[in-house]
């Protein structure tokens, strides 16, 4: 059995907490003061990138045959997503009086697209798409040099950064007809996570990446089209921010901890996917329009929603993990 890497457990836990925090202000978007929710969203942007990078660090380089790899990943991903998508669909149907026929139609589409009742599940579908590529890329990774991987990562960053050029030069958009378009996508995060785990990352690179993250954000937001801002998880600023944050965690988490600390972190990390699946149910369904939260200031309400959702969802997932066949429910 592959030995657990402590800092990867910490990365997954932090990414999970960031996802919950990012979604905590969602129910407050109707407020006139949107500065704080926008700032939280900006600071929490690396959350999904960190999840992708952790998957790359854990899965790339295993050398597992394609069929065995996909079967194992599908069990861990598809069944929990299907179960909770159905839950979200029927909760929405009950809350908003959606016809049964429409709910049934949504269930039929679960294998192909995330449900409207929880659009946060887009991440799982993107991750599954990346899984299809992992066993194909593996043979190349085993033969490639560090410089070759760095070249591919650079080409990936250039491909997702090319739309920035359209902010300042009147040229056609880089759409699906552009050759660079096919170098983009979320698989680059998996490759970056594998690269950072395999090769030593210096503090100098980490600091430079965080500085670049800030500069990219400033440059793009001086003058940019609205559709460029929309795809924020593939923004060069977010990529650099994710690189820096992942690297900081690698450096700061000690290699050796007590067995008790390792056990706690491993348990919380194992719950992270389940928490990702259910947190919107509690946050946006059960805590929406709650009197005692609505009476608070925006700042206190956001923190309270984040704290309550974190405690309740981790507790629920820990209990579910004790059930037989829990991997089909929470991964």
Image: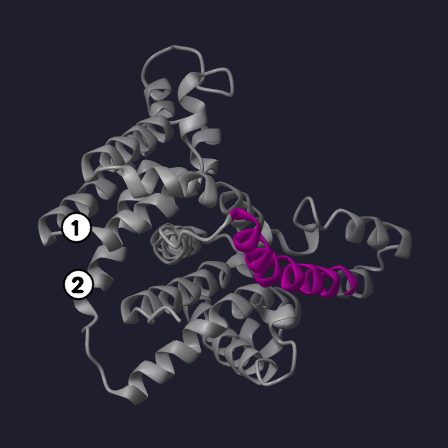
Q: Residue at x 38, y 47 (%)?
A: 190
Q: Position of residue 90 (x, y in %)?
A: 79, 63
Mark with earlier residue (2, 1):
1
Location of the C terminus by quadrant is bottom right
Q: Where is residue 137 in the image (x, y as percent from the top left)?
A: 41, 39
Q: Is mark 1 on a helix, strand or loop?
A: helix
Q: Judge from the rendering whether residue 14 lies leftward or rightward of residue 121; answer left or right.
A: left
The residue identified by callout 2 is 251
Q: In this view, does 228 lie above or below 204?
A: above
Can residue 182 be seen from the camera position used here?
Answer: yes
- Taking depth in this image into account, of 245 and 76 the one nearest to the observer is 76
Marks 2 and 1 close (CB-CB < 8 Å): yes
Q: Position of residue 15 (x, y in %)?
A: 39, 62
Q: Is residue 175 magenta?
A: no
Q: In this view, does 321 lie above or below 117?
A: below
Main SS of the magenta part reads helix
Q: What element carries label 2?
A: helix
- Magenta span: 66-90
Tag on residue 206? 1
Q: Looking at the image, is mark 2 or mark 1 nearer the viewer?
A: 2
- Taking depth in this image into account, of 274 and 71 the one nearest to the observer is 71
Residue 179 placement: quadrant: top left
Q: Which colour scheme is used?
A: one colour
Location of the N terminus by quadrant is bottom left
Q: Outermost residue toward the bottom?
A: 260
Q: Where is residue 300 in the image (x, y as percent from the top left)?
A: 43, 72
Q: Residue at x 60, y 56 (%)?
A: 71
Q: Residue at x 21, y 70 (%)?
A: 253
């Amino acid at each position: 059995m592959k030995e657990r890497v402590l800092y990867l457990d910490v990365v997954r836990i932090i990414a999970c907490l960031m996802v919950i925090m990012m979604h905590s202000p969602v129910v407050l978007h109707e407020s006139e003061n949107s500065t704080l929710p926008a700032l939280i969203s900006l600071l929490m942007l690396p959350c999904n990138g960190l999840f992708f990078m952790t998957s790359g660090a854990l899965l790339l380089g295993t050398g597992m045959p394609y069929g065995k790899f996909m079967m194992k990943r599908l069990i861990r991903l598809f069944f929990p997503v299907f179960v909770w998508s159905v839950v979200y669909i029927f909760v929405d149907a009950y809350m908003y009086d959606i016809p049964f026929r429409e709910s049934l139609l949504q269930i039929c589409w679960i294998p192909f697209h995330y449900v409207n009742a929880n659009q946060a599940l887009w991440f799982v579908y993107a991750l599954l798409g990346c899984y299809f590529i992992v066993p194909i890329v593996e043979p190349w990774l085993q033969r490639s040099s560090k410089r070759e991987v760095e070249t591919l990562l650079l080409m990936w960053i250039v491909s997702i950064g090319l739309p920035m050029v359209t902010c300042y030069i009147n040229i056609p958009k880089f759409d699906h007809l552009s050759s660079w378009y096919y170098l983009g996508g979320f698989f680059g995060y998996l490759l970056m996570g594998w690269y950072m785990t395999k090769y030593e990352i210096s503090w100098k690179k980490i600091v430079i990446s965080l500085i670049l993250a800030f500069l990219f954000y400033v440059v793009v937001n001086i003058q940019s089209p609205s559709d460029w801002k929309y795809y924020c998880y593939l923004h060069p600023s977010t990529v650099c921010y994710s690189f820096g944050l992942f690297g900081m965690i690698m450096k700061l988490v000690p290699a050796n901890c007590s067995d008790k600390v390792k056990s706690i972190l491993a348990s919380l990390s194992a719950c992270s996917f389940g928490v990702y699946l259910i947190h919107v149910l509690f946050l946006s369904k059960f805590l929406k329009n709650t009197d005692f939260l609505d009476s608070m200031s925006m700042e206190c309400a956001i923190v309270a929603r984040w704290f309550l959702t974190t405690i309740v969802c981790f507790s629920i997932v820990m209990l579910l993990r004790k059930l037989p066949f829990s991997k089909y429910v929470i991964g």
